[in-house]
Amino acid sequence: MAIQKPRGTEDILPGQAEAWQYVERKAREWFARYRYREIRTPLFEHTELFQRGVGETTDIVEKEMYTFADRKGRSLTLRPEGTAGVVRAFVEHKLYAEPDVVKLYYLGPMFRYERPQAGRQRQFHQIGVEAFGSADPRLDAEVMELAWRIFTDLGVQHLRLDVNSVGCPMCRPRHRQALVEHLAGVKDELCPDCQSRLVRNPLRVLDCKQERCQELTQDAPTVLDHLCDACRAHFDAVRKALEALGVPYAVNPRLVRGLDYYTQTAFEFVVEGEGHLAGTICGGGRYNGLVAELGGPDVPGIGFAFGVERLLYVLAAQGTRLPADAGLDCFVIALGEAAKGEALVLAQRLRAAGLSADVDYLDRKLKAQFKVADRYGARFAAILGDDELARGVVQLKNLATGEQEAVPLADVAEAVRQRLNRSEG
Ligand SMILES: [Zn+2]
Ligand SMILES: [Zn+2]
């Protein structure tokens, strides 16, 4: 029996990969405009990195990691997210020695043992950025604006940006205490997960997806009510900068990130809609304590990440057309033995000129070769028979308009290029 792919993985086939390349290309273009540079970190890291960098009490670390012992018994984990590895590399290579804001981006597969569903896989792909070295609230706004640019450029509709401040280690204990006091009254009605969160990480009760828990925490005190002066000023400045940049947003005081090294700005891009379509497509925020948590100096950071599968799912569901096949500039049709040899050389010349070209290798008749050209999405056919060969020309046919003319063999590449430019003009 043939072997099948593991549950929760996908093969990205030709015809689908073009949409992936398109999203990646758009993201890279926008990253470059904001001076983000690519970093590539390993797909697996020491398990401890994620325990410290993602947090022991998170669902990711508690339930979802692919952790294994290597042949020497060391505990390794397939990366479940991108930030921890980037911060590790930032510290390990002392990138903080640059007296500058360091802007990094990454893209690639991540791994989480979750129940697969629409737009959610066990091997999934994330694109994200991290900016280190500045606590300036304008940088928070720029990071959000960058994500907003990418999504609007890709044509995401019904997009909402939720923004919040989760405070800092100075002001959070006050909120934590008020929250615990508030929740003590409804403790027994909370879901089992939340009852344990209440002890270990009460902030995350606000994040629970259970309807009953959301009802019970409706009037719970939010961090926004307890911000210290510095966090209040930071949040106000972030909002002002977002407004100056013309980025629409809503304050969502229930937006939380339950770990100590997350500070101040937290944000999410949410798609509004029905059922599976609705939900978060991108999350991010400030993590001024993370670099130090992972053994580096006290350097502030901020970033975001979005899942490519989820984004493509939303775009498809919203009816956005994405590139599926780039087609072919020219298919070279050969008739007769001598012409076949010459067709290969002509294809070579077209390719060397930067055009895409192919020839028939299955000994097809003229009509069948035209059908192939059509199937390949060819824009031009260069027809080469013994007669044309003797005259040193090809019949160059525009397959969209049907126009056809004889072009000297040596000029075919240039002729195709000119006609392509004209039709694009
Ligand atoms: Zn504070
Ligand atoms: Zn709950």
Image (cartoon, rainbow, N blue to C red):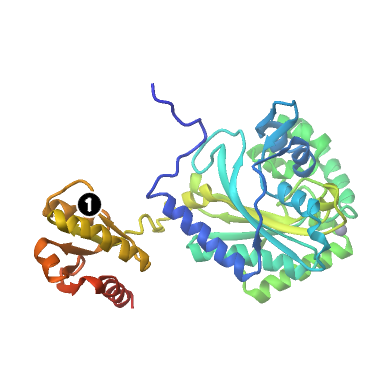
Report the residue at 59% width, 64% height from top.
Answer: 148
Q: Position of residue 232 (x, y in %)?
A: 83, 64
Location of residue 422 with respect to 353 vertically, above or below? below
152 sits left or right of 18 in the view: right
Location of residue 195 with respect to 224 vertically, above or below? above
Q: Which residue is mark 1?
A: 360
For the C terminus, give its image quadrant. bottom left
Q: Position of residue 420 (x, y in %)?
A: 30, 72
Report the residue at 65% width, 62% height from top.
Answer: 37
Q: Residue farthest to the left?
A: 387
In the figure, residue 424 lies in which quadrant?
A: bottom left
The amino acid pointed to by label 1 is Asp
Report the residue at 79% width, 46% height from top.
Answer: 259
For the N terminus, give its image quadrant. top left
170 sits left or right of 188 in the view: right
Q: Residue farthest to the top?
A: 1
Q: Report if residue 393 is visible in the image.
A: yes
Task: Judge the density around disc 1: few (<14), some (14-19), many (≥20) Cα neighbours within 10 Å.
Answer: some
- Indicate the secondary structure of the residue bearing disc 1: loop
Report the residue at 58% width, 55% height from top.
Answer: 270
Q: Nearer the viewer, residue 363 or 228?
A: 363
Q: Nearer the viewer, residue 60 or 192?
A: 60
Q: Position of residue 376 (x, y in %)?
A: 27, 54
Q: Position of residue 53 (x, y in %)?
A: 77, 44
